Amino acid sequence: MLYGIAAATTALFLAAVLAALLRVPALRLGFVERRQRQRRVPLSGGIAVVLATCLVAIAGDRWGIAPLGDDIGVLLIAAGAVAGLGLVADVWRLKARLLVLGTAVAAAFVVPYGDTGVLAGAVAVGWITFVALAFRSLDHADGVAGTVGVVTAFGAAACAAVEVLDGPAVLMSVLAAALTGFLMHNWPPARVALGSCGSLFAGFLLATAAVTARAGGDEAEGAGVLFALTAVAAADAVLVAVARRLAGRPLLRGGPDHLAHRLRRLGLTPQGVAVLIGAAAFSGVLVGTLAHTGWVDAQAVWWVAGGALVVVLGLLRVPVYGPPRARGPYGAAPARAGRRDPRAGARFGPRSGSRQGARPGARRAAVYGPRRQSESAVEHPETGDRRVGRGASSQVNGSLRVRNG
């Protein structure tokens, strides 16, 4: 008990200090994520969470204060590999299929097949991969991923403690403390962010601990508990997938279509969004924990599923995409409207150099004139005089065009 409190306190302060110390080097190296156009958010928070969690857990195991066991050692190695893969994705552009494949391979080494069986173990591998990537998707707004991660970690720790799994329980407590220290710098307006490194690491540990706590129990009830513990992350992933499918957008293309983005369009402040999503996560985790311990009937998880479905269907009606750009018959952008000759009033086609509506046999004119007119005789229609000088620039006479962005 005393070690758990000391370990959590150490992880909290270590994560907070590391996040602050790594912020300046991340800014200088350009290891940042741009949010709200010009604001640059360093991705050093994920590295701080990974280092704080692993260092505190390994120190307790080495000193014999809280032996974690061989299974937790393998779990930390696999989670560290997933974090390294996420760090590569933060530094360079990494295809999503490589993230999925790497996370699935790491999950295959930590699933307790002796308790779950081969078939259920394969499903658990898919679930761990899905939750890890869903937590990566939650890092789209300030304070959201950290708040959901803290709440979920406490729920997973409680489920592990009920099953007398001291190693996963201690590890989840350390992770919750590290995420709390990270939140000191990530609360809106955020000064650091998790990035793929920290979000994949946290989601992988949380999903694996929940699967380990539920291994060997009823499969249908276990699936409901696992969903309740990670209902917010699952709802966000489903919302994004359905919205992009209905809009005809690529599934892997980013966009302002997540939970926090839609809630912001409804008028909530960034702090209000983080609190509301955290409260939703707490509700799901509470139901899942009570169902796992047997204090409530397992059918209560259906209320969580129904609430998540109502939220997804309701937020789908919030417009987040701009109007689609008109396309031509072959998928190309439509041609620009014709331009008129300022001297003769005749229209020129957008592609061809012929004058539309001109007399038959008239000479073809160029569509795009030079940017500067040579110093030659220019006739002024008001006076009829011909003066030598530079003609009026088309940039002065033409209408002003402003590019968005």
Image (cartoon, helix red, strand yellow):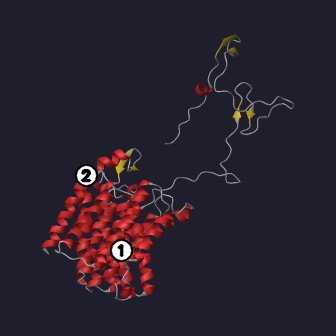
Q: Give the label on residue 69, or none.
A: none
Residue lying furthest right in this view? 361
Q: Amino acid at mark 1?
A: Ala
Looking at the image, residue 118 lies above or below residue 107: below
**Mark 2 burial class by Cα count in 10 Å: few <14, some 14-19, many 20+:** some
Tell me which residue sits at (67%, 41%) in the image. Answer: 336
User: Relative to the observer, which residue lies in front, 396 or 220?
Assistant: 220
The quadrant in which residue 247 appears is bottom right
Q: At which x and y percent is residue 293?
A: 26, 84
- Relative to 346, 151 lies left or right: left
Q: Earlier in the sequence, mark 1 or mark 2?
A: 2
- Relative to 304, 97 lies left or right: right
Tell me which residue sits at (37%, 87%) in the image. Answer: 114
Looking at the image, residue 39 lies above or below residue 60: above
- Relative to 43, 313 lies left or right: right
Element under disc 2: helix
The quadrant in which residue 246 appears is bottom right
User: Relative to the observer, which residue lies in front, 273 or 365?
Assistant: 365
User: Relative to the observer, which residue lies in front, 190 or 53?
Assistant: 53
Q: At which x and y percent is residue 367?
A: 72, 33
Looking at the image, residue 35 lies above or below residue 284: above
Q: Which residue is mark 2?
A: 20
Tell me which residue sits at (25%, 72%) in the image. Answer: 171
Q: CA distance from mark 1 to mark 2?
A: 28 Å
Q: Which residue is mark 1?
A: 207
Q: Is residue 27 visible?
A: yes
Q: Is residue 275 visible?
A: no
**Mark 1 burial class by Cα count in 10 Å: few <14, some 14-19, many 20+:** many
- Quadrant including the N terminus: bottom left
Q: Amino acid at mark 2?
A: Ala
